[in-house]
């Protein structure tokens, strides 16, 4: 409880609201789904749908609250047994009894009969969990046992059309109240049991008095439902009404609308599921491709590193190679230049000889040797006189040496 | 993929799609297998979406006549 307060002596002190809430909790826990018998001493129905009544015995009174449908057959002065829970109106601190069901004592003690039958069938095992069939995960053909007319069918249709329009409804038009109701409902159940394409059956009926709903407490009907091979949902009366059909069915819905909601998954949910599953496939593929690409680029990287290493080696080799090449070129060039110089020298020499000879100087050779000294010549020697455009063989007649 | 056939119904298709989405998570699945799963998965998800897109209300009244149950569309 929030904000509990303790005084100087460590004594717990409640606020009014706290004590009322606390009492309400305790009473709800201890006194829910209990049976009380007495006489109706006052009854007032309000347009809001609520009804207030007082139940009394020879000594005490009990304030009760209910809705119009539950007490539709009730009048002041009747001896009744009511089923329900104690509830505290915390703002006023009053307590009242919230009625779920009313059984008239005069009418053959309906509730006693109800309880006896319930015990009997329960002992036989008709309500055992082990016989409960699982609802199909995705029913598409839904069988409905209810009256073709009336709000129950349109409630179910509304829900199905809004949430799950992909579902097909099959209605077995059935009398759900009155004299022949039990026979009619049993007939519909038998018929549906032959139709293998029906995925799930809803037995539905709107709210009513306990007498109206007592059809669904008939032993014959309960046993017929138990024999069904198709999963069945009971949606009878209001949330507070419990019939034996509810116990024998595979699932109990508090209203026909809830039955429709329980058995068909909405289109939106299904689309989400489809997208979720398909996305899972796509993202896995994307992940794998990315992974493979990463592997590829990792391999690329390794190759590149190797290549780079190779290139470094190559570079060193290349530098050496070029150095050699350049050195060789330089040497070649040098040799070429040297040879060029040499050949040029010869050319120049020849050219000089020619120029000199053309000026009138001639070269005298004796035995192919150039003679520049007259002392090396004698009379009658044979000589060759080399001129710019030819040579002459001559014999020396006279030698005259210059005087110093 | 061993199961190339038309799904029996919506429920089957949805179940198969779910199985495929689980199957592909296995790291031993090859890229080729993945592409096959992708192909089948996209077929199944289209199939399911088409089924869901079928929004015509279908409600029939069943009437028992001479031991046969007849179907009558209700408007």
Image (tube, rainbow, N blue to C red):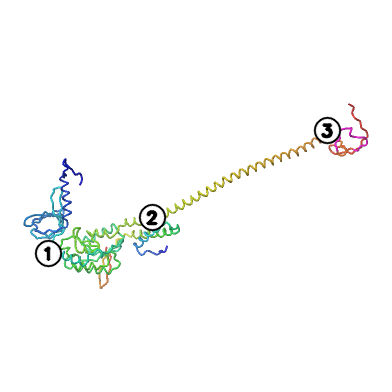
Across and down, in percent, residue A223 comes to 21, 68
Query: What residue span does the magenta drawing correspond to?
Result: A369-382
Taking the image as drawn, is residue B64 in sight?
A: yes
- Work out how far the residue at label 1 is from the one at label 3, CA to CA, in angstroms: 170 Å
The C terminus of chain A, quarter of image:
top right
Q: Chain of mark 2?
A: A
Q: Which residue is mark 1?
A: A109
* Residue at 9% across, 60% down: A79
Distance CA(mark 3)–CA(mark 2): 110 Å
Q: Which labelled disc corresponds to residue A359?
A: 3
Quick one: A80 or A32, which is closer to the camera? A32
State yes or no: residue A38 in magenta: no
**Residue A146's image quarter?**
bottom left
| Residue A180 % position (x, y) | 18, 68
> Mark 3 or mark 2: which is in front?
2
Locate residue A36: give its quadrant.
bottom left
Q: Is residue B71 above or below residue A37?
A: below
């Amino acid at each position: 409880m929030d904000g509990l307060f303790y005084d100087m002596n460590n004594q717990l002190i409640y606020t009014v609201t706290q004590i009322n809430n606390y009492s309400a909790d305790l009473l709800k826990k201890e006194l829910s789904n209990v049976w009380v018998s007495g006489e109706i001493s006052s009854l007032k129905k309000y347009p809001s749908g609520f009804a207030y009544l007082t139940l009394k015995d020879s000594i005490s009174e009990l304030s009760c609250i209910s809705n119009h449908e539950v007490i539709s057959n009730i009048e002041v002065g009747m001896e009744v047994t009511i089923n329900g829970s104690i509830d505290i109106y915390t703002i006023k601190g009053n307590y009242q009894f919230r009625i779920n069901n009313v059984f008239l004592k005069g009418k053959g003690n309906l509730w006693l009969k109800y309880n006896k039958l319930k015990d009997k069938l329960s002992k036989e095992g008709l309500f055992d969990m082990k016989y409960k069939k699982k609802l199909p995960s995705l029913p598409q053909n839904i069988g409905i046992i209810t009256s073709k007319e009336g709000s129950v069918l349109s409630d179910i249709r509304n829900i199905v059309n809004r949430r799950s329009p992909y579902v097909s409804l099959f209605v077995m038009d059935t009398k759900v109240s009155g004299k022949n109701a039990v026979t009619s409902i049993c007939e519909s159940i038998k018929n549906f049991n032959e139709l293998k394409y029906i995925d799930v059956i809803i037995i539905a009926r709107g709210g009513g008095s306990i007498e109206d709903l007592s059809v669904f407490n008939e032993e014959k009907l309960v046993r017929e439902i138990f024999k069904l091979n198709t999963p069945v949902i009971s949606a009878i009366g209001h949330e507070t009404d419990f019939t034996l059909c509810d116990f024998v069915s595979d699932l109990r819905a508090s209203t026909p609308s809830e039955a429709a909601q329980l058995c068909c998954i909405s289109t939106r949910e299904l689309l989400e599921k489809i997208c979720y599953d398909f996305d899972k496939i796509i993202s896995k593929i994307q992940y794998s491709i990315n992974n493979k690409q990463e592997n590829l680029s990792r391999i690329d990287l390794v190759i590149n590193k190797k290549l780079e290493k190779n290139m470094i080696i190559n570079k060193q080799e290349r530098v050496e190679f070029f150095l050699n090449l350049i050195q060789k070129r330089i040497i070649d060039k040098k040799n070429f230049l040297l040879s060029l110089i040499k050949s040029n020298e010869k050319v120049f020499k020849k050219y000089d000889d020619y120029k000199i000879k053309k000026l009138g100087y001639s070269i005298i050779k004796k035995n192919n040797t150039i003679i520049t000294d007259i002392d090396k010549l004698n009379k009658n020697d044979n000589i060759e006189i080399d001129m710019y455009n030819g040579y002459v063989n001559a014999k020396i007649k006279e030698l005259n040496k210059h005087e110093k | 993929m061993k199961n190339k056939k038309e799904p029996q119904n919506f429920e089957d298709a949805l179940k198969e799609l779910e199985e495929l989405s689980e199957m592909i998570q296995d790291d031993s699945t090859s890229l080729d297998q993945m592409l096959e799963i992708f192909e089948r998965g996209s077929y199944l998800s289209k199939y399911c979406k088409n089924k869901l897109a079928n929004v015509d209300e279908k409600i029939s009244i069943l009437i028992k006549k001479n031991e046969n149950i007849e179907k009558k569309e209700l408007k």
